Image (spheres, rainbow, N blue to C red):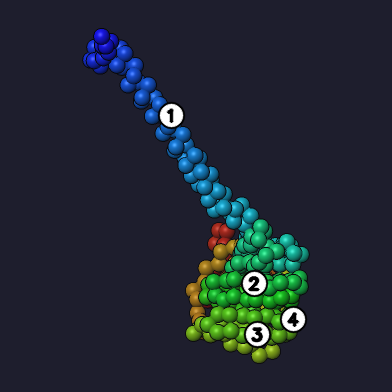
């Protein structure tokens, strides 16, 4: 006689046994899920961290050199090139990539002595300069742009492109085009490095702006575009002496106003 096989219906098991089986299934699935997705999360984290580091690197190695009103600053770039900053000027460069790409951004006025080597660029709001090894002066303020080559060759770009050689200069015209300066007076152009400032047929309001910049002082003046000044001043003189030098030719006198001055008609 064949032995009967007894099959125990699932519903005969206790609720505790059924719950135990389901719990084991759930926990085993959870382990599988963790095993499948943890590596993805890990790589995503590493990728995000790498992106953050790459984004921060330029900021970490960016160098800013700033001269305030009333001061001149000299700095040496990573390749040994030297830069003199006139008052109220700014120079920015990246030391991390310097020997791959020699380049600076600037605003204001600066005198460069560039070591020979790969291309050296100066970017300003008004135009760009490219050289290999030379000495040159750059003036770039509020829509005004002027470059003077002291030695070597300088390529200048703005509305057009001009190659300057030794003792040549270029200035941006009202229409944005670069115009050659005939026989620039080199010593007068770079004399600011020695605290002497020359002006040839310059509107008086521009001269007053330079005086304020060099002496870090406020001067109130009702601008008259018909007043054109030719002359010079030295920072060895007091501010009162300088104001007398630039104002007397136009029949103006100086009045003291708290921490500043005012130019009025005599």
Task: Indicate which disc, 2 or 3, sits on the residue closer to the N terminus.
Answer: 2
Query: Sequence order check: which comes first, mark 1 or mark 3?
Result: 1
- As measured in the structure, the alpha-carbon distance from the residue carrying label 1 to the one carrying label 3 is 71 Å
Q: Which residue does the numbered mark 4 point to in the structure image?
A: 152
> Which of the two residues, 135 or 88, is positioned nearer the viewer here?
135
Work out whether residue 45 or residue 26 is closer to the camera in this orientation and state it.
Answer: 26
Secondary structure beneath label 2: strand
The residue lying at 57 percent from left, 53 percent from top is 54
If you read the primary sequence from the N terminus, does the residue marked by circle 1 or circle 4 appear first? Answer: 1
The quarter of the picture where residue 97 lies is: bottom right
Residue sitting at x 76%, y 73%: 116
- According to the picture, the residue beneath numbered tag 1 turns out to be 31
- Quadrant hosting residue 251: bottom right
* Location of residue 193 with respect to 165 vertically, above or below: above
The residue nearer to you, when weighing 138 against 77, is 77
**Residue 163, numbered label:** 3
x then y, percent, for residue 51: 53, 50
- Point out the frontmost of discs 1 and 4: 1
Q: CA distance from mark 2 to mark 3?
A: 14 Å
Proximity of marks 3 and 4: CB atoms separated by less than 8 Å: no
- Disc 4 element: loop
Q: Which residue bears the numbered disc 2?
A: 121
Residue drawn at 39 percent across, 24 percent down: 27
């Amino acid at each position: 006689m064949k032995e009967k096989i007894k099959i125990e219906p699932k519903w005969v098991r206790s609720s505790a046994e059924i719950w135990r089986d389901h719990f084991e299934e759930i926990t085993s699935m959870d382990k599988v899920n963790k095993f499948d997705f943890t590596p993805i999360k890990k790589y995503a984290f590493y990728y995000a961290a790498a992106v953050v580091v790459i984004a921060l690197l330029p900021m970490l190695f960016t160098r800013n050199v700033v001269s305030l009103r009333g001061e001149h600053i000299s700095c040496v770039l990573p390749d040994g090139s030297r830069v003199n900053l006139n008052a109220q000027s700014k120079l920015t460069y990246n030391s991390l990539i310097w020997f791959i790409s020699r380049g600076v951004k600037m605003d204001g006025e600066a005198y460069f002595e560039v070591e020979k080597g790969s291309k050296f660029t100066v970017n300003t709001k008004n135009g760009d300069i490219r050289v290999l090894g030379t000495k040159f002066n750059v003036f770039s303020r509020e829509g005004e742009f002027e470059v003077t080559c002291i030695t070597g060759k300088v390529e200048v770009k703005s509305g057009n492109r001009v190659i300057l050689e030794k003792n040549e200069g270029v200035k941006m015209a009202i229409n944005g085009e670069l115009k050659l300066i005939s026989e620039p007076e080199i010593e007068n152009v770079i004399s600011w490095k020695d605290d002497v400032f020359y002006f040839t047929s310059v509107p008086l309001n521009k001269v007053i702006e330079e005086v304020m910049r060099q002496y870090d002082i406020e001067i109130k003046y009702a601008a008259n575009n018909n007043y054109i000044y030719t002359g010079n001043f030295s920072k060895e003189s007091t501010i009162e002496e300088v104001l007398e030098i630039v104002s007397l030719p136009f029949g103006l006198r100086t009045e003291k106003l708290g921490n500043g001055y005012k130019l009025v008609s005599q």
